[in-house]
Image: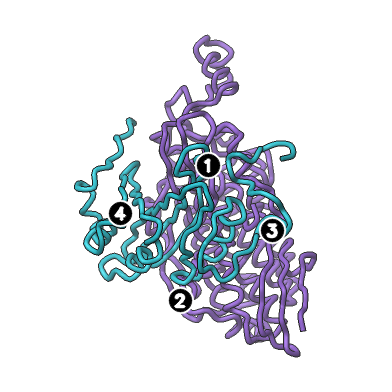
Chain colours: A cyan, B purple
Amino acid sequence: MALAPAITDLDQLKGHPAIGNLLAWNPAVVEGAKFDREEITIYVEHSFIREVCVLLRDNPECPFNFLADVTCVDWYPREPRFEVVYHLLSIPKKERVRLKVRLQSDSPALDSVTPVWAGANYFEREVFDLFGVRFIGHPYLRRIQMPEDWEGHPLRKDYPVEGYR
Amino acid sequence: MILNMGPQHPSTHGVLRVILEIDGENIVRIMPDIGYLHTGIEKTCEAKFYQQIVTLTDRIDYLCPLTNNLCYVLAVEKLLGLEIPPKAQWIRVLLNELTRINSHLVWLGTHALDIGAMTVFLYCFREREDILRLFEMVSGQRMMTSYFRIGGLALDPPIGFFEKTREFSNRFPSKVDEYENLLTGNPIWGMRTKGVARITAEDALALGASGPTLRGSGVDFDLRRDMPYSGYENFKFKIPTSTDGDVFARYICRVQELRESNTIVQQALDGMPEGPTKADAPKVVLPDREKMKTQMEALIYHFKIITEGFAVPEGEIYQAVESPRGEMGYYVVSDGTAKPYRVHIRAACLANLQALPTMCEGRLIADVVAAIGSIDIVLGEIDR
Protein backbone atom coordinates (compact mmCIF):
# COMPACT_ATOMS: atom_id res chain seq x y z
CA MET A 1 0.00 0.00 0.00
CA ALA A 2 1.59 3.25 -1.13
CA LEU A 3 1.42 6.23 1.18
CA ALA A 4 -0.44 9.30 -0.04
CA PRO A 5 1.65 12.47 0.11
CA ALA A 6 0.91 14.86 2.96
CA ILE A 7 -1.35 17.85 2.28
CA THR A 8 0.05 21.07 3.72
CA ASP A 9 -1.99 23.64 1.78
CA LEU A 10 -4.19 25.61 4.20
CA ASP A 11 -6.83 26.36 1.53
CA GLN A 12 -7.44 22.66 0.96
CA LEU A 13 -7.73 21.96 4.67
CA LYS A 14 -10.13 24.78 5.53
CA GLY A 15 -13.06 22.34 5.54
CA HIS A 16 -11.86 20.64 8.72
CA PRO A 17 -13.98 21.90 11.65
CA ALA A 18 -11.01 22.79 13.87
CA ILE A 19 -9.04 24.66 11.20
CA GLY A 20 -12.08 26.49 9.81
CA ASN A 21 -13.03 27.53 13.31
CA LEU A 22 -9.57 28.87 14.16
CA LEU A 23 -9.15 30.72 10.86
CA ALA A 24 -12.53 32.39 11.32
CA TRP A 25 -11.51 33.55 14.82
CA ASN A 26 -8.05 34.88 14.05
CA PRO A 27 -6.00 33.80 11.00
CA ALA A 28 -2.77 34.78 12.81
CA VAL A 29 -2.97 31.82 15.24
CA VAL A 30 -2.59 29.17 12.53
CA GLU A 31 1.03 28.96 11.39
CA GLY A 32 0.36 25.99 9.18
CA ALA A 33 -1.41 22.66 8.95
CA LYS A 34 -0.76 19.17 7.72
CA PHE A 35 -2.93 16.22 6.74
CA ASP A 36 -0.83 13.09 6.72
CA ARG A 37 -1.82 9.41 7.16
CA GLU A 38 -5.41 10.36 8.03
CA GLU A 39 -4.29 12.64 10.86
CA ILE A 40 -4.60 16.38 11.04
CA THR A 41 -1.91 18.58 12.60
CA ILE A 42 -2.27 22.31 13.26
CA TYR A 43 0.75 24.49 14.04
CA VAL A 44 -0.35 27.11 16.54
CA GLU A 45 1.43 30.39 17.29
CA HIS A 46 2.87 29.84 20.79
CA SER A 47 1.32 32.80 22.61
CA PHE A 48 -2.24 31.74 21.65
CA ILE A 49 -2.26 28.11 22.81
CA ARG A 50 -4.60 28.61 25.75
CA GLU A 51 -7.14 30.64 23.76
CA VAL A 52 -7.00 28.07 20.95
CA CYS A 53 -7.71 25.25 23.40
CA VAL A 54 -10.66 27.09 24.93
CA LEU A 55 -12.02 27.84 21.47
CA LEU A 56 -11.72 24.23 20.29
CA ARG A 57 -13.17 22.86 23.53
CA ASP A 58 -16.23 25.12 23.47
CA ASN A 59 -16.97 24.97 19.75
CA PRO A 60 -20.61 23.77 19.62
CA GLU A 61 -20.28 22.10 16.19
CA CYS A 62 -17.34 19.90 17.03
CA PRO A 63 -16.31 20.18 20.69
CA PHE A 64 -12.84 18.76 21.31
CA ASN A 65 -13.78 18.08 24.91
CA PHE A 66 -11.08 15.54 25.81
CA LEU A 67 -7.38 16.27 26.12
CA ALA A 68 -5.81 12.92 25.40
CA ASP A 69 -2.16 13.77 25.68
CA VAL A 70 0.51 16.44 25.97
CA THR A 71 4.08 15.69 25.04
CA CYS A 72 7.13 17.22 23.43
CA VAL A 73 9.64 16.46 20.68
CA ASP A 74 13.18 17.83 20.77
CA TRP A 75 14.59 18.64 17.30
CA TYR A 76 18.08 19.57 18.55
CA PRO A 77 20.15 21.15 16.95
CA ARG A 78 17.44 22.53 14.66
CA GLU A 79 15.62 25.77 15.57
CA PRO A 80 12.88 26.16 16.70
CA ARG A 81 14.05 23.31 18.87
CA PHE A 82 11.02 22.14 20.85
CA GLU A 83 7.64 21.06 19.56
CA VAL A 84 5.02 20.74 22.28
CA VAL A 85 2.35 18.37 20.98
CA TYR A 86 -1.29 18.25 22.15
CA HIS A 87 -3.66 15.49 21.12
CA LEU A 88 -7.31 16.47 21.39
CA LEU A 89 -10.28 14.17 20.98
CA SER A 90 -13.89 15.03 20.30
CA ILE A 91 -15.93 12.37 22.05
CA PRO A 92 -19.30 13.37 20.46
CA LYS A 93 -17.86 13.63 16.92
CA LYS A 94 -15.15 10.95 17.21
CA GLU A 95 -12.53 13.23 15.67
CA ARG A 96 -8.95 13.76 16.65
CA VAL A 97 -6.74 16.76 16.10
CA ARG A 98 -3.08 17.36 16.91
CA LEU A 99 -1.90 20.82 17.93
CA LYS A 100 1.75 21.73 17.78
CA VAL A 101 3.56 24.68 19.28
CA ARG A 102 7.15 25.40 18.25
CA LEU A 103 9.53 26.94 20.79
CA GLN A 104 13.04 28.33 20.56
CA SER A 105 15.78 26.69 22.62
CA ASP A 106 16.57 29.69 24.87
CA SER A 107 14.30 29.38 27.93
CA PRO A 108 11.36 27.59 26.29
CA ALA A 109 8.07 28.54 27.93
CA LEU A 110 4.40 28.74 27.01
CA ASP A 111 1.02 29.11 28.67
CA SER A 112 -0.24 26.13 30.63
CA VAL A 113 -3.56 24.61 29.53
CA THR A 114 -4.27 23.20 33.00
CA PRO A 115 -6.89 25.96 33.59
CA VAL A 116 -8.69 24.65 30.47
CA TRP A 117 -8.39 20.92 31.22
CA ALA A 118 -7.45 19.96 34.76
CA GLY A 119 -6.07 16.74 33.29
CA ALA A 120 -3.17 18.57 31.61
CA ASN A 121 -1.54 18.89 35.03
CA TYR A 122 0.53 15.70 35.12
CA PHE A 123 1.30 15.74 31.40
CA GLU A 124 2.72 19.24 31.59
CA ARG A 125 4.72 18.38 34.69
CA GLU A 126 6.17 15.45 32.79
CA VAL A 127 7.16 17.64 29.83
CA PHE A 128 8.72 20.13 32.25
CA ASP A 129 10.59 17.35 34.03
CA LEU A 130 11.91 15.51 30.98
CA PHE A 131 12.37 18.41 28.52
CA GLY A 132 12.72 21.54 30.62
CA VAL A 133 9.84 23.39 28.93
CA ARG A 134 8.15 25.72 31.42
CA PHE A 135 4.38 26.14 31.55
CA ILE A 136 3.28 29.58 32.71
CA GLY A 137 0.30 29.51 35.06
CA HIS A 138 0.69 25.85 36.02
CA PRO A 139 -0.49 25.30 39.61
CA TYR A 140 2.34 22.99 40.71
CA LEU A 141 5.24 22.86 38.24
CA ARG A 142 7.61 20.41 39.95
CA ARG A 143 9.50 17.35 38.72
CA ILE A 144 7.21 14.32 38.51
CA GLN A 145 9.21 11.29 37.29
CA MET A 146 12.80 12.20 38.17
CA PRO A 147 13.99 12.93 41.74
CA GLU A 148 13.64 16.52 42.94
CA ASP A 149 17.41 17.12 42.90
CA TRP A 150 18.06 15.66 39.44
CA GLU A 151 20.14 17.76 37.08
CA GLY A 152 19.26 18.01 33.41
CA HIS A 153 16.28 16.89 31.36
CA PRO A 154 16.64 13.26 30.24
CA LEU A 155 14.52 13.24 27.09
CA ARG A 156 16.45 16.07 25.45
CA LYS A 157 18.50 14.90 22.51
CA ASP A 158 21.76 16.25 23.93
CA TYR A 159 21.31 14.02 26.98
CA PRO A 160 23.09 10.68 26.42
CA VAL A 161 21.21 7.38 26.40
CA GLU A 162 24.04 5.52 28.12
CA GLY A 163 26.59 6.37 30.79
CA TYR A 164 26.91 9.51 32.86
CA ARG A 165 26.41 13.02 31.74
CA MET B 1 -1.74 15.98 60.32
CA ILE B 2 0.23 14.71 57.36
CA LEU B 3 0.14 10.97 56.80
CA ASN B 4 2.39 9.19 54.34
CA MET B 5 0.86 6.19 52.62
CA GLY B 6 3.24 4.13 50.51
CA PRO B 7 5.35 3.67 48.49
CA GLN B 8 5.59 0.28 50.21
CA HIS B 9 1.94 -0.09 51.08
CA PRO B 10 0.20 -3.24 49.80
CA SER B 11 -3.02 -1.48 48.83
CA THR B 12 -1.27 1.01 46.56
CA HIS B 13 -0.69 -1.73 43.96
CA GLY B 14 2.99 -1.13 43.47
CA VAL B 15 5.02 1.88 44.42
CA LEU B 16 2.50 4.70 44.61
CA ARG B 17 3.09 7.16 47.41
CA VAL B 18 0.09 9.14 48.57
CA ILE B 19 0.51 12.11 50.89
CA LEU B 20 -2.61 12.60 52.97
CA GLU B 21 -3.45 15.71 54.92
CA ILE B 22 -5.95 14.52 57.49
CA ASP B 23 -8.21 15.91 60.14
CA GLY B 24 -8.99 12.93 62.38
CA GLU B 25 -10.20 10.25 59.99
CA ASN B 26 -11.24 12.77 57.33
CA ILE B 27 -9.09 13.68 54.37
CA VAL B 28 -8.48 17.37 53.79
CA ARG B 29 -6.05 17.05 50.90
CA ILE B 30 -4.52 14.17 49.02
CA MET B 31 -1.48 14.25 46.77
CA PRO B 32 -0.22 11.29 44.77
CA ASP B 33 3.56 11.18 44.37
CA ILE B 34 4.86 9.05 41.52
CA GLY B 35 8.13 8.32 39.75
CA TYR B 36 9.44 5.47 41.92
CA LEU B 37 9.33 3.09 38.97
CA HIS B 38 10.60 5.43 36.25
CA THR B 39 12.68 3.32 33.89
CA GLY B 40 13.10 5.71 30.98
CA ILE B 41 11.53 3.42 28.40
CA GLU B 42 10.76 6.36 26.09
CA LYS B 43 14.44 7.30 26.03
CA THR B 44 15.55 3.69 25.50
CA CYS B 45 13.22 3.42 22.49
CA GLU B 46 15.18 6.15 20.71
CA ALA B 47 18.28 3.93 20.71
CA LYS B 48 16.62 0.74 19.41
CA PHE B 49 15.48 -0.49 16.01
CA TYR B 50 11.74 -0.42 15.43
CA GLN B 51 11.41 -4.20 15.73
CA GLN B 52 13.39 -4.34 19.00
CA ILE B 53 10.98 -2.01 20.77
CA VAL B 54 8.18 -4.60 20.81
CA THR B 55 9.86 -6.31 23.77
CA LEU B 56 10.16 -3.00 25.64
CA THR B 57 6.44 -2.33 25.32
CA ASP B 58 5.69 -5.50 27.32
CA ARG B 59 7.48 -4.10 30.31
CA ILE B 60 5.33 -0.99 30.52
CA ASP B 61 2.23 -2.65 31.86
CA TYR B 62 2.65 -6.15 33.25
CA LEU B 63 -1.09 -6.82 33.21
CA CYS B 64 -1.72 -6.09 29.54
CA PRO B 65 1.52 -6.62 27.59
CA LEU B 66 -0.35 -7.65 24.45
CA THR B 67 -2.37 -4.43 24.39
CA ASN B 68 0.89 -2.48 24.52
CA ASN B 69 2.34 -4.67 21.76
CA LEU B 70 -0.75 -4.07 19.64
CA CYS B 71 -0.79 -0.32 20.09
CA TYR B 72 2.88 0.01 19.19
CA VAL B 73 2.81 -2.26 16.14
CA LEU B 74 -0.35 -0.56 14.84
CA ALA B 75 1.38 2.81 15.06
CA VAL B 76 4.46 1.61 13.15
CA GLU B 77 2.32 -0.23 10.60
CA LYS B 78 0.45 3.00 9.92
CA LEU B 79 3.74 4.84 9.48
CA LEU B 80 4.86 2.18 7.00
CA GLY B 81 1.46 1.92 5.29
CA LEU B 82 1.36 -1.86 5.82
CA GLU B 83 -1.73 -3.95 5.21
CA ILE B 84 -2.24 -6.72 7.79
CA PRO B 85 -3.91 -10.01 6.76
CA PRO B 86 -7.33 -10.61 8.37
CA LYS B 87 -6.27 -13.74 10.24
CA ALA B 88 -3.52 -11.84 12.04
CA GLN B 89 -5.97 -9.06 12.91
CA TRP B 90 -8.49 -11.52 14.34
CA ILE B 91 -5.90 -13.32 16.44
CA ARG B 92 -4.76 -9.93 17.72
CA VAL B 93 -8.34 -9.13 18.76
CA LEU B 94 -8.76 -12.55 20.35
CA LEU B 95 -5.58 -12.21 22.40
CA ASN B 96 -6.37 -8.64 23.35
CA GLU B 97 -9.70 -9.64 24.80
CA LEU B 98 -8.06 -12.48 26.73
CA THR B 99 -5.61 -9.89 28.02
CA ARG B 100 -8.50 -7.68 29.10
CA ILE B 101 -10.05 -10.60 31.00
CA ASN B 102 -6.66 -11.37 32.58
CA SER B 103 -6.15 -7.76 33.64
CA HIS B 104 -9.67 -7.37 35.02
CA LEU B 105 -9.29 -10.62 36.97
CA VAL B 106 -6.17 -9.35 38.70
CA TRP B 107 -7.93 -6.06 39.35
CA LEU B 108 -11.03 -7.77 40.79
CA GLY B 109 -9.01 -10.08 43.01
CA THR B 110 -6.71 -7.43 44.44
CA HIS B 111 -9.45 -4.80 44.73
CA ALA B 112 -11.64 -7.19 46.70
CA LEU B 113 -8.65 -8.19 48.82
CA ASP B 114 -7.98 -4.54 49.63
CA ILE B 115 -11.53 -4.08 50.84
CA GLY B 116 -11.45 -7.31 52.83
CA ALA B 117 -12.95 -10.06 50.65
CA MET B 118 -10.22 -12.70 50.65
CA THR B 119 -11.92 -15.50 48.72
CA VAL B 120 -12.49 -13.62 45.47
CA PHE B 121 -8.74 -13.28 45.03
CA LEU B 122 -8.26 -17.06 45.00
CA TYR B 123 -11.12 -17.57 42.55
CA CYS B 124 -9.85 -14.89 40.16
CA PHE B 125 -6.31 -16.18 40.12
CA ARG B 126 -7.61 -19.67 39.31
CA GLU B 127 -9.01 -18.39 35.98
CA ARG B 128 -6.06 -16.08 35.41
CA GLU B 129 -3.79 -19.12 35.55
CA ASP B 130 -5.76 -20.66 32.65
CA ILE B 131 -5.28 -17.52 30.57
CA LEU B 132 -1.57 -17.36 31.35
CA ARG B 133 -1.27 -20.97 30.17
CA LEU B 134 -2.91 -19.94 26.89
CA PHE B 135 -0.41 -17.09 26.55
CA GLU B 136 2.44 -19.47 27.27
CA MET B 137 1.12 -21.84 24.64
CA VAL B 138 0.95 -19.17 21.96
CA SER B 139 4.07 -17.15 22.72
CA GLY B 140 6.24 -19.21 25.05
CA GLN B 141 5.90 -16.68 27.85
CA ARG B 142 3.31 -16.24 30.55
CA MET B 143 3.56 -12.50 31.00
CA MET B 144 6.12 -10.80 28.74
CA THR B 145 4.57 -12.20 25.59
CA SER B 146 5.96 -9.99 22.77
CA TYR B 147 3.82 -11.99 20.38
CA PHE B 148 2.86 -9.31 17.87
CA ARG B 149 5.35 -8.17 15.28
CA ILE B 150 5.38 -5.23 12.92
CA GLY B 151 3.53 -6.75 9.98
CA GLY B 152 1.68 -9.56 11.74
CA LEU B 153 2.38 -12.19 14.37
CA ALA B 154 5.63 -13.74 15.54
CA LEU B 155 4.43 -17.17 14.43
CA ASP B 156 1.23 -19.11 13.83
CA PRO B 157 -0.62 -20.20 16.97
CA PRO B 158 0.19 -23.85 17.80
CA ILE B 159 -2.14 -26.77 17.10
CA GLY B 160 -4.75 -27.05 19.82
CA PHE B 161 -4.63 -23.40 20.84
CA PHE B 162 -8.06 -22.51 19.49
CA GLU B 163 -9.63 -25.62 21.08
CA LYS B 164 -8.10 -24.78 24.46
CA THR B 165 -9.29 -21.19 24.17
CA ARG B 166 -12.81 -22.33 23.32
CA GLU B 167 -12.84 -24.67 26.29
CA PHE B 168 -11.87 -21.76 28.53
CA SER B 169 -14.37 -19.33 27.07
CA ASN B 170 -17.22 -21.86 27.37
CA ARG B 171 -16.73 -22.29 31.09
CA PHE B 172 -15.77 -18.69 31.86
CA PRO B 173 -19.30 -17.12 32.15
CA SER B 174 -20.18 -19.51 35.00
CA LYS B 175 -17.02 -18.35 36.78
CA VAL B 176 -18.08 -14.71 36.46
CA ASP B 177 -21.37 -15.76 38.09
CA GLU B 178 -19.31 -17.10 40.99
CA TYR B 179 -17.52 -13.78 41.49
CA GLU B 180 -20.78 -11.91 41.26
CA ASN B 181 -22.39 -14.26 43.79
CA LEU B 182 -19.67 -13.36 46.22
CA LEU B 183 -19.74 -9.61 45.69
CA THR B 184 -22.57 -7.95 43.76
CA GLY B 185 -25.37 -8.60 46.23
CA ASN B 186 -23.11 -8.73 49.28
CA PRO B 187 -24.26 -6.03 51.77
CA ILE B 188 -20.73 -5.48 53.17
CA TRP B 189 -19.34 -5.01 49.66
CA GLY B 190 -22.19 -2.60 48.92
CA MET B 191 -21.47 -0.53 52.02
CA ARG B 192 -17.79 -0.24 51.17
CA THR B 193 -18.37 0.70 47.52
CA LYS B 194 -21.76 2.35 46.93
CA GLY B 195 -21.62 6.12 47.08
CA VAL B 196 -17.86 6.00 47.76
CA ALA B 197 -15.33 8.04 45.76
CA ARG B 198 -17.85 9.67 43.45
CA ILE B 199 -16.82 11.55 40.36
CA THR B 200 -19.11 13.31 37.91
CA ALA B 201 -18.91 12.91 34.15
CA GLU B 202 -17.78 16.55 33.72
CA ASP B 203 -14.94 16.15 36.21
CA ALA B 204 -13.88 12.83 34.73
CA LEU B 205 -13.74 14.32 31.22
CA ALA B 206 -11.85 17.42 32.33
CA LEU B 207 -9.31 15.25 34.15
CA GLY B 208 -8.70 13.10 31.11
CA ALA B 209 -10.00 9.93 32.73
CA SER B 210 -10.85 7.13 30.32
CA GLY B 211 -11.93 3.52 30.22
CA PRO B 212 -14.12 2.11 32.99
CA THR B 213 -13.35 5.15 35.16
CA LEU B 214 -15.07 7.36 32.57
CA ARG B 215 -17.82 4.88 31.68
CA GLY B 216 -18.65 4.41 35.36
CA SER B 217 -19.59 8.10 35.36
CA GLY B 218 -21.97 7.68 32.46
CA VAL B 219 -19.93 8.67 29.40
CA ASP B 220 -20.63 6.07 26.74
CA PHE B 221 -17.34 5.96 24.88
CA ASP B 222 -15.15 3.05 23.95
CA LEU B 223 -12.44 3.22 21.28
CA ARG B 224 -13.11 -0.36 20.19
CA ARG B 225 -16.60 0.59 19.06
CA ASP B 226 -16.28 4.31 18.31
CA MET B 227 -12.91 4.46 16.56
CA PRO B 228 -12.29 0.82 15.66
CA TYR B 229 -8.82 -0.55 14.97
CA SER B 230 -7.45 -3.97 14.04
CA GLY B 231 -10.82 -5.23 12.77
CA TYR B 232 -12.95 -4.47 15.85
CA GLU B 233 -15.68 -3.20 13.49
CA ASN B 234 -16.44 -6.88 12.69
CA PHE B 235 -17.48 -7.71 16.23
CA LYS B 236 -20.73 -7.12 18.09
CA PHE B 237 -20.47 -6.23 21.74
CA LYS B 238 -22.08 -3.99 24.32
CA ILE B 239 -20.32 -1.20 26.18
CA PRO B 240 -21.37 -1.39 29.83
CA THR B 241 -21.87 2.00 31.47
CA SER B 242 -23.24 3.21 34.76
CA THR B 243 -24.28 6.66 35.86
CA ASP B 244 -23.47 6.51 39.57
CA GLY B 245 -19.78 7.38 39.25
CA ASP B 246 -18.82 5.56 42.45
CA VAL B 247 -16.62 2.57 43.21
CA PHE B 248 -19.54 0.19 42.73
CA ALA B 249 -20.31 1.66 39.29
CA ARG B 250 -16.75 1.06 38.15
CA TYR B 251 -16.90 -2.45 39.60
CA ILE B 252 -20.10 -3.24 37.69
CA CYS B 253 -18.68 -1.84 34.44
CA ARG B 254 -15.60 -4.03 34.65
CA VAL B 255 -17.48 -7.17 35.63
CA GLN B 256 -19.83 -6.68 32.67
CA GLU B 257 -16.77 -6.13 30.48
CA LEU B 258 -15.52 -9.56 31.53
CA ARG B 259 -18.64 -11.08 29.99
CA GLU B 260 -18.51 -8.87 26.88
CA SER B 261 -14.84 -9.66 26.29
CA ASN B 262 -15.69 -13.33 26.49
CA THR B 263 -18.34 -12.94 23.77
CA ILE B 264 -15.74 -11.22 21.56
CA VAL B 265 -13.39 -14.15 22.15
CA GLN B 266 -16.14 -16.55 21.05
CA GLN B 267 -16.96 -14.47 17.96
CA ALA B 268 -13.29 -14.40 17.03
CA LEU B 269 -13.08 -18.19 17.38
CA ASP B 270 -16.26 -18.73 15.35
CA GLY B 271 -15.32 -16.46 12.48
CA MET B 272 -11.56 -16.96 12.37
CA PRO B 273 -10.54 -16.36 8.73
CA GLU B 274 -8.02 -18.49 6.90
CA GLY B 275 -4.83 -17.22 5.38
CA PRO B 276 -1.38 -15.99 6.28
CA THR B 277 -0.56 -14.30 9.59
CA LYS B 278 2.18 -12.06 8.21
CA ALA B 279 2.04 -9.17 5.79
CA ASP B 280 3.68 -9.51 2.40
CA ALA B 281 6.55 -7.09 3.04
CA PRO B 282 9.93 -8.86 2.82
CA LYS B 283 11.86 -5.76 3.87
CA VAL B 284 9.97 -5.49 7.16
CA VAL B 285 8.76 -8.97 8.10
CA LEU B 286 11.33 -11.65 8.89
CA PRO B 287 11.17 -14.62 6.47
CA ASP B 288 10.23 -18.13 7.60
CA ARG B 289 13.09 -20.16 9.03
CA GLU B 290 12.65 -22.72 6.27
CA LYS B 291 12.95 -20.11 3.49
CA MET B 292 15.85 -18.44 5.24
CA LYS B 293 17.80 -21.68 5.12
CA THR B 294 17.02 -22.53 1.52
CA GLN B 295 16.68 -19.24 -0.38
CA MET B 296 19.48 -16.74 -0.87
CA GLU B 297 17.16 -13.74 -1.08
CA ALA B 298 15.35 -14.58 2.16
CA LEU B 299 18.69 -14.97 3.90
CA ILE B 300 19.77 -11.50 2.72
CA TYR B 301 16.54 -9.88 3.94
CA HIS B 302 16.84 -11.68 7.27
CA PHE B 303 20.43 -10.47 7.71
CA LYS B 304 19.51 -6.90 6.71
CA ILE B 305 16.52 -6.63 9.06
CA ILE B 306 18.46 -8.03 12.02
CA THR B 307 21.62 -5.96 11.53
CA GLU B 308 20.33 -2.70 10.06
CA GLY B 309 16.63 -2.67 10.84
CA PHE B 310 14.33 -1.12 8.25
CA ALA B 311 13.83 2.53 7.41
CA VAL B 312 10.42 3.96 8.21
CA PRO B 313 9.23 6.91 6.09
CA GLU B 314 9.23 10.29 7.78
CA GLY B 315 6.08 11.18 9.66
CA GLU B 316 4.21 10.84 12.93
CA ILE B 317 1.32 8.79 14.23
CA TYR B 318 -0.80 8.90 17.36
CA GLN B 319 -2.39 5.49 17.68
CA ALA B 320 -4.86 4.92 20.49
CA VAL B 321 -6.36 1.64 21.63
CA GLU B 322 -8.74 0.75 24.42
CA SER B 323 -6.60 -0.91 27.07
CA PRO B 324 -8.25 -2.49 30.13
CA ARG B 325 -7.62 0.81 31.90
CA GLY B 326 -8.65 3.29 29.24
CA GLU B 327 -7.15 5.09 26.30
CA MET B 328 -3.62 3.90 25.69
CA GLY B 329 -1.82 5.92 23.03
CA TYR B 330 1.48 5.58 21.25
CA TYR B 331 2.86 8.68 19.59
CA VAL B 332 5.67 7.62 17.27
CA VAL B 333 7.74 10.14 15.33
CA SER B 334 9.97 8.93 12.53
CA ASP B 335 12.77 10.89 10.88
CA GLY B 336 13.20 8.36 8.08
CA THR B 337 15.83 6.15 9.73
CA ALA B 338 15.64 2.66 11.26
CA LYS B 339 15.27 4.00 14.79
CA PRO B 340 12.32 6.06 15.96
CA TYR B 341 13.03 9.73 16.62
CA ARG B 342 10.61 9.79 19.51
CA VAL B 343 8.20 7.34 21.11
CA HIS B 344 5.75 8.69 23.63
CA ILE B 345 3.32 6.53 25.54
CA ARG B 346 0.06 8.03 26.67
CA ALA B 347 -0.59 6.11 29.87
CA ALA B 348 -4.26 5.74 30.74
CA CYS B 349 -3.39 5.29 34.42
CA LEU B 350 -1.46 8.57 34.62
CA ALA B 351 -4.57 10.50 33.62
CA ASN B 352 -6.89 8.33 35.71
CA LEU B 353 -4.74 8.84 38.80
CA GLN B 354 -5.37 12.59 38.58
CA ALA B 355 -8.99 11.85 39.44
CA LEU B 356 -7.98 10.47 42.86
CA PRO B 357 -8.02 13.83 44.74
CA THR B 358 -11.47 14.68 43.34
CA MET B 359 -12.75 11.28 44.45
CA CYS B 360 -11.29 11.25 47.95
CA GLU B 361 -11.19 14.74 49.40
CA GLY B 362 -13.65 15.10 52.27
CA ARG B 363 -13.96 11.35 52.77
CA LEU B 364 -12.42 8.79 55.16
CA ILE B 365 -8.95 7.24 54.96
CA ALA B 366 -10.42 3.77 54.42
CA ASP B 367 -12.14 5.04 51.28
CA VAL B 368 -8.79 5.94 49.72
CA VAL B 369 -7.95 2.25 49.54
CA ALA B 370 -11.27 1.55 47.80
CA ALA B 371 -10.75 4.49 45.41
CA ILE B 372 -7.21 3.50 44.43
CA GLY B 373 -8.41 -0.02 43.75
CA SER B 374 -11.35 1.20 41.70
CA ILE B 375 -9.26 3.19 39.21
CA ASP B 376 -7.11 0.09 38.60
CA ILE B 377 -3.66 1.60 38.47
CA VAL B 378 -0.48 -0.05 37.26
CA LEU B 379 2.56 1.90 38.38
CA GLY B 380 4.76 0.53 35.64
CA GLU B 381 2.57 2.31 33.12
CA ILE B 382 2.31 5.52 35.13
CA ASP B 383 6.06 5.93 35.55
CA ARG B 384 7.33 4.21 32.41
Q: Are marks 4 and 3 on the same chain?
A: no
Three-letter code for the amino acid on which mark 2 is drawn: Ala
Chain for disc number 4: A
- Please, what secondary structure does the residue beneath circle 2 have? helix
Q: Could you say which disc has been placed on residue B201 in the image?
A: 2
Tag 4 near tag 1, CB within 8 Å = no
> What residue appears at the point 49 percent right and 12 percent down from the top-left corner?
B297
Say which amino acid is labelled 1. Arg
Pointers 2 and 4 in contact (C-beta within 8 Å): no
Name which of mark 3 and mark 2 comes first in the sequence.
Answer: 3
Looking at the image, the residue that sits furthest to the right is B8
Residue B71: % across, % down: 50, 47
Q: Amino acid at mark 3?
A: Gly
The residue wearing badge 1 is B342
Kindly report which numbered mark, 2 or 4, lies closer to the viewer in this rendering: 4
Q: Mark 1 or mark 2, which is nearer the start of the sequence? A: 2
Q: Position of residue B137 (x, y in %)?
A: 65, 40
> Toward the viewer: B243 or A159?
A159
Q: Give the residue at x 61% y 73%.
A: B356
* A75 vs A133: above or below: above
